[in-house]
Amino acid sequence: MTRRLRPALVLVVLIYAACTPRPGPITVAENVVTVQNQTTRDWRNVLVTVNDHFTGGVPTLAAGGRMNGPLDKFQTAFGQKYDVSRQRVFKIVVTATDANGDPVKLEYDPLHR
C-alpha cells in the first residue's frame, strides 16, 4: 500500500509547487525591502525609491541576485531617514541599467497586488 501512495504524494507535491505563486521581484517583509534580479543580465546603478522620496541602492546587482535593504536605511536627499514606526510603504520603484545598456524599471504597489 505504501508503494501506491508514493506516486500520489509526489503528484500532490508537484501540483502544489506549480500552483504556488512565484514571489515578485520586489517584496517587503519585516521592514526590509528585497529586490531580486530575475533576469539573465546583470544590472548597474540600481536605485530603489520608497514612497517617492526615500532612496537607497547598489552599484550592481548580478543576474539572479538579490539585494536586501532595511527600510530605516533609506533616506531623502536631505538625510531624513525612513521612520518604520510612523510610515507605511505605499510605493517602491526600482530603476537600473542592464548589461546591454537597456533601462530597467520595476514598480511595487502593495495596494494593487
Image (spheres, rainbow, N blue to C red):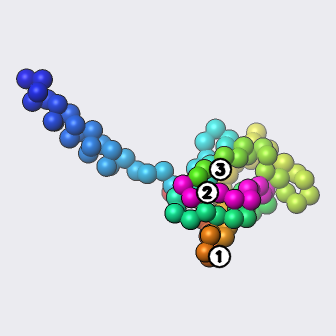
Label 1 sits on residue: 101
Residue type pointed to by label 2: Ala
Looking at the image, can residue 95 be seen?
A: no
- Residue sitting at the far top: 1
Residue 3 sits in quarter: top left
Q: Main secondary structure of the magenta part?
A: strand
Secondary structure of the residue carrying tag 2 is loop
Left-right relation of 34 to 1: right
Q: For the residue marked with disc 1, what is the amino acid?
A: Gly
Identify the residue under disc 2.
62
- The Cα–Cα distance between marks 3 and 1, rounded to whole angstroms, is 20 Å
Q: Residue at x 78, y 57 (%)?
A: 55
C-alpha separation, residue under disc 2 versus residue under disc 1: 14 Å
Residue 94, percent from left and from top: 66, 62
Tag 1 secondary structure: loop
Instruction: Residue 28 in the image: state x and y as whole percent.
Output: 61, 47
From the top left corner, tell me how far across and down residue 6 is, in percent.
17, 31
Q: In this view, does 78 lie above or below 96?
A: above
Q: What stretch is highlighted in magenta?
A: 54-64
Residue 85 occupies quadrant: top right
Q: In which quarter of the image is residue 61?
A: bottom right
> Image height check: is 12 above or below 38?
above
Which residue corresponds to mark 3?
67
Q: Where is residue 98 in the image (x, y as percent from the top left)?
A: 62, 69
